[in-house]
Structure formats: structure tokens, C-alpha cells
Image (cartoon, grey):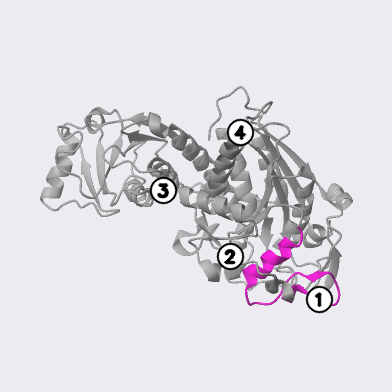
Amino acid sequence: MNFELKALSLTQADKSAIDALIVLVADGLASNASGAGSTLAKLIAQARSVGDFETGVGSSLVAYRVDGVKASRVVLVGAGDASAGSVRRAVVAGMGHLKATKTKKVGVVLSLLPEKTGQVRAAVMASADALYTFTTTKPSAKASHVSAVQIGVADEKSVLNEFAVARAAAAGVAFAKEWANRPANHATPTMLANAASKIGRKGVVKTTVLGHKEVTALGMGAFLAVAQGSPEPLRFIVMNYQGGAKSSAPVVLVGKGITFDTGGISIKPASEMDEMKYDMGGAASVLGTFVALAELQPAINVVGLIPACENMPDGLSVKPGDVVTSMSGQTIEILNTDAEGRLVLCDALTYAERFKPRCVIDIATLTGACVIALGGVRSGLFTESEPLAQSLSAAGDVSLDLCWRMPLDDEYAEGLKTSFADMANVAGRAGGSITAAKFLQKFTKNMHWAHLDVAGTAWKSGAAKGATGRPVPLLLQYLVDEAQTLRAEKPAKGGANSKKKKVG
């Protein structure tokens, strides 16, 4: 999808050589608003005067071949209070009228709205989301003909940075959706590693892939235990983006990469097990974030770690009650083989220490308990670091990719105690998302760490089944914010982008 930003008044929109226009109209717009002499302004005024169009969010009116307007189709859409959230809903509604048409280029006109932060980002992200169609294993699917979206604003210069971040985020989300939506036989650990390596071909991302031999040498006993029941070889993916000074500590992103999760010997029920192809949603979000980094090139260093494997039942599979030794040296009694995500993550978190990171953020479709707690609206955020909690929450608010901080009281770890190892991998049903986080916390004592449980937000079920690409927008915004913080602390020297204008 190609996105373009352009200063566009209603009068200019009348004459715009474009296939369709989506014009957002906020509450309280006066009839003599900017561009009142334009054909579009007259159309809006007339439609409102007779009650055919209202400005409630998502209300719409479609017109075809309007005299005086060059575009074939005009869609008027109510944008309510013109907040970023309202703009997102309005653009989705507007695009819904065009997706099935042969429209190729769409203009989204925001010029009439009272300017508010995040409108341009919301319009870009909503357009990409509304027009997305998965076709990799369904070539008969009717993909949208729309290949270009022009965002029309009153003042182009004031939103250039916001637009750049939005465009990068949209590319990252699309990549994350693509790989999360692929069925497991089209997204094996090896395929995932190959996809990561292709991102590295853009020149600003370096990717290294470790196999069974290297992972064994590292002593990643927990990761190996999960992978041993599948004939598909495991892959440990290490990605490195260096946009800041060489001496600057990186942010490390760790994504759970279970490309299919049967539950292992503690096998899951058959119902909806197909959705366990989404159990690599954390890995997909890390890949998507690196696609966005390659596009945006902010002045910050970032490492991505993805432990990728399948969790399958087999004669060689790890059994309930088995005890394994993690890379950290801590032993784990595996009481439930379906609590495998934390096992692959714990070794990756230990590996992250070697980078002496600024902070570590793991992203995982970890627990059904988090879905019960927060549903599909907010991702669960766990961290002891107050600054990290505030920064991630703020990034979620700005990007409309929301999270909610959950507790990490020490008492929640009591259930992880066992007589046969340093810890068990489960602690019962009560507070399941928290006890899972407490397990991971045992491997992060030397780092500033946060855990994002995206089990409720990485994909949707039912009629709208599909990956969401979350939390790529949150992660990218956090990294952009951190780049600004680093620049304020000390100007970067010698980074990959030292001769380029820094974005964010």
C-alpha cells in the first residue's frame, strides 16, 4: 500500500485527479467552514440540511459522479469529536464503501477537521487495516483494488513526522499480519527465519539464525525441551538494527515464536485449535517492528530475539513432571507442557543479557487468563519498572494500541514452588497471567524488563478471524520515543544514520 501526504483544501479536493474521496466531517461544522465555496462544501451543507447526513462517528453518505467534483465517488463520513479514535472508526467506515469497487486511488480528506494529535496516524492505520486481505493461501480471495491512499490535510508540514511513523507502522503491521495469518505448514520455524533474513537484506538490519547445534551449545535446555517433540527443526533468530551510536545500549525485543501449539502431551481440546497458528504472534510483532525500523530508521539500537519451534505430542516430547535446566542454570519442573511459551522465552531472556540492554521487552500470546482479564481491547503489561511502565503505556495511548498494567506482587510466585526443581512452570488457574509473568521475571533480575501478554489482542476469532498486527504500533512508538530521549541525553555519534536526518 502506497501512502501520500498532501496539503488539500476542499476546493483543491474538488479538482483532485483521484478515483474516490472520503471526506471526514466533525460535529459542529459550520456551513461557512473553510472551502465553503467548493462543490464538496455545498454537498455537505445540503446533505446536512435535509437530514441525509449526520456527523456521528461512522455515519456516511455515498455520492456518485457529483457535478463539479473530479473524483468518481465521494463518501462523506461523520468523525464525531475528531479525536484520533473517532477518525480511525470513520476511515474504516468510509473504506468499507470502496473496498469492493474498482477504485485504485483514494483520497482521505482531513482538512475540515479541527486539528488534533494522532489524526493522520489514525487515518493511515485505519486505511491499511480496512483494505487488508489475506491471499497467500487463498488466491481466490477478492483483494481490494486500492493501491494508493492520499491523506489530505490543512497543514502538511506540521504532521510530517506523524505521517512517517504511521507509514512505517502500517508496513510493519501488514508484515506481522501476513506471517501470523499463515497456517503452520506455511510458517514453520525455518520459514520464519527466512522471512527475518529477508528483512536483513534491506541493509539496516542484520540477521543471524542459530540451529539445534548452536542452541544446545548455549545450554538452552528449556527451549530444547519444547522443540524436541516436533520433526520441524527449531530456529533461534537474532536480529540487529543499529541506528544509534555503537556505544548506545540496545532495546531488546523478545518474541514468542511457537509456530503451532498443540499443547504437547498436555494436549489442547480440538475446538479452535487451528487458531494456535497465532501462537507466534509475539514473534510476528517483532518481525513487523523490524520492518518498520528499516522503513523509518530512528536513531536507536534494537535487538530482536525469536525462539521459534513447534509444540507437538510425540514419543520424544517432554512429559509432565520432567525437569529441565534452563540457560540461566535454574531448573524447571514442567508440570504442564501447554505452558511452553514461558519455557522458550526464559532462555531467550537469559540470552538477552549479553547485549547489556537498555531494557528488554518480551511479547507473547502467553495466557488465556489474560484474555479473561482484559479481553481483546488491551494487552497485559507487566513490569517492576515505573519509568518503563509509563513509557509503554504512553506509547500505547498515542498509537491507539492500548495496554494495561497488571500486578507483580511477590506473593503470586508462591505457586511456582516445587520440591523437585528451582521452580515449576505453572502455578494453577488463579491469576494465571500474573504467575506466568512471575515465572519470566525469575530470568530478568539483571535487566530492566517488561512483558506484554498479547493473547487477547494479537488476533480476532469468529467471523472477523485474523491477525491484528498488534502490538507493532505500540512497540514502534515506544522506540521512537526512546530515540528522542536518547537524543536529548546525548547526541548520537557513529550510528548507521548519523549522516541522515533523524526521524522521531
Q: Residues within 10 Å of mark 2 (few under 14, many from 20)?
A: some
Residue 42 in the image: state x and y as whole percent: 14, 38
Task: Say if mark 4 contacts mark 1, CB within 8 Å.
Answer: no
Circle on res. 59: none
Q: Residues within 10 Å of mark 4 (few under 14, many from 20)?
A: many
Was residue 301 drawn as part of the magenta stretch in this picture? no
- Residue at numbered disc 1: 418
User: For the residues marked 3 and 4, what is the alpha-carbon distance in whole angstroms?
Assistant: 31 Å
Is 331 left or right of 342, judged from the image as shown? right
- Helix, strand or loop at label 4? It is loop
Residue 250 in the image: state x and y as whole percent: 69, 41
- In this view, the mark in front (3 or 1): 1
Taking the spot 55% from the left edge, 25% from the top edge, the residue there is: 501
- In this view, the mark in front (3 or 2): 2
Please state which amino acid type lies under the numbered disc 4: Ala
User: Is there any visible trace of residue 253 in the rendered image?
Assistant: no
- Helix, strand or loop at label 1? It is loop
- Residue at numbered disc 3: 130
- Helix, strand or loop at label 2? It is loop
Residue 273 in the image: state x and y as whole percent: 61, 67
Q: Which residues are magenta?
A: 415-443
Q: Residues within 10 Å of mark 1 (few under 14, many from 20)?
A: some
Give the mark, 3 or 4, whose residue is nearer the N terminus: 3
Residue reaching furthest to the top: 499
Taking the spot 14% from the left edge, 42% from the top edge, the residue there is: 31
Circle on res. 406: 2
